[in-house]
Image (cartoon, grey):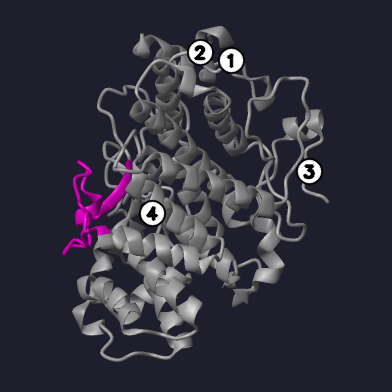
Amino acid sequence: MKNIILSLLILTFISCSDDFLDIPPATGLTDDKLVDLTAMRALINGAYSLTRGNQGVPFCGESSLYGTTMVRDVVVRNNNNYPQFFDHLLANDLGYFVRGYRILNTLNTIAVKDLSIMEGTDDQKKAILGDMHFLRALIYFDLNNYFELSSTGYSVPLLLKPLGVDETISSSKTGEVRNAIEEDIEQARFNFQNNLSGVANYQAATALAARIYFFHKKYDKAYEMADEVIKTGDFIIESDVKAPFNPLGTSRENIFSFKFNPGDNANPRPTTSLRNAYQPNETTGSLSLNPNGVLSRLMNADLQDNRWSFYTVQPNITYIDGKYSSDQMDMIYIRLAEMYLIRAESNIMNNNSVSQQDVDDINILRFRANPSTILTFIPEKNAALDTLYNDRTKELAIELGDHYLNTRRLQKGIIKTDQEGVGIKPYSEYADLLAFPFPLNEIQIHGLNRKP
């Protein structure tokens, strides 16, 4: 029964129109059939499947490609899809908005159900609720980051229940969306307590909470969450920088991944888009390292850094091919290295000073990357923050658009294009150009905009 419902769910999504409000019941079944935990778990599995990329374009990998291109860490070659991101000339038919809300529609279908009256154990119900809140926080976190319009403070519509075709929507303030994201991730942690797990689990939810609070600039909470994950001892920093990216997803550095399933015959898989874009081939790959970008400058400043092993250097081009070398591997979403970076920077921001623990957190990754660069003293605050920015940029390069998020958080300038001239383009000039446009269909039918 579970497999039948899941198949119907996937087929229904494929046949949906481009207006997310026109989506029919999430499984293709009438609402009176969505009354048991088997159906609820099928909805969860379907939402994860859509997020990781089985049937249709993957939601979880797109932000990495878009974000890296938008802050110009890479240059574009041989693909007409990416120049619009590099040049900040975004079209209104990206598809990202609709894909996100199709997943949210499924999750919201669960959110309005009363699981307490369904037959099953409390643990089964909490696992379903944990996954629902975890994935809804994850999807909204991504959507909010890419659709927030800096000049007005408005973002995507905040929808926490399924909507009918006659209902109207409007953009929500970024603060409202962020509050909902934080509430969802805390509900995920609550339901995943006592090591209860569904697809995700308590540690994954706590690690995602650390990331969310960090980019929401709530550094006290970010520190608390990252510290909790680190102190469990359930995860380790691998001695080899490449170890976390093994196709089997068995590294103990990985906290949560979108799993490759060999039973999925349809493409794309979790890492398909990433693998294809970064292929070490001048005619088939789409993106390579921008020789004038921040990442290139940082890497060239330390040629002994082991993270260079993720790159293939040729005379006229540098390929970024080491992290996603196959389309048949798990896509790592959160790993322990990020928790050390978050804990150190959050602690510095909270205390306005640098502690030995912060230095130790920096050094655990520096020792792996290049032992000769470990800090042997406690630097002053600004120097430590510069160090963390540089180390974060290198450590998390091309992972989940991290440098895009960090550039926006810190309002950093980005490299200019040849058409713009030489030098750095300040954040004030491009901030609104980083916001994705709403689909034309949503603008025409529902009047969706980000004006007050």
Q: Is residue 314 visible?
A: yes
Q: Is the Cβ of the residue at disc 4 closer than 8 Å to that at disc 2?
A: no
Residue depicted at x 73% and y 51%: 154
Q: Residue at point 78% right, 29% down?
A: 168
Q: Is residue 394 above or below residue 248?
A: below
Q: Which residue is mark 1?
A: 25
Q: Earlier in the sequence, mark 1 or mark 3?
A: 1
- Which residue is found at the position 32% from the left and 22% from the top? 265
Q: In this view of the protein, can residue 82 be seen by the observer? A: no
Which is more N-terminal, label 3 or label 2?
A: 2
Q: Residue at x 50, y 68 (%)?
A: 219
| Tag shown at residue 34 | 2
Amino acid bearing label 2 = Leu
User: Compared to 282, does 18 lie above or below?
Assistant: above
Mark 2 residue element? loop
- Look at the image and say whether residue 30 sits in the magenta stretch: no
What span is colored magenta in the figure? 232-257
Mark 1 nearby-residue class (10 Å; few <14, some 14–19, many ≥20): some
Q: Give the numbered dot on residue 148.
A: none
Res 449 label? 3
The secondary structure type at the circle numbered 3 is loop
**Residue type, numbered disc 4:** Ala
Contact flag, marks 1 and 3 (Cβ < 8 Å):
no
Percent position (x, y) of residue 145? 59, 52
Q: Which residue is mark 4?
A: 207
Residue type highlighted by circle 1: Pro
In percent of width and height, residue 192 lies at 37, 41
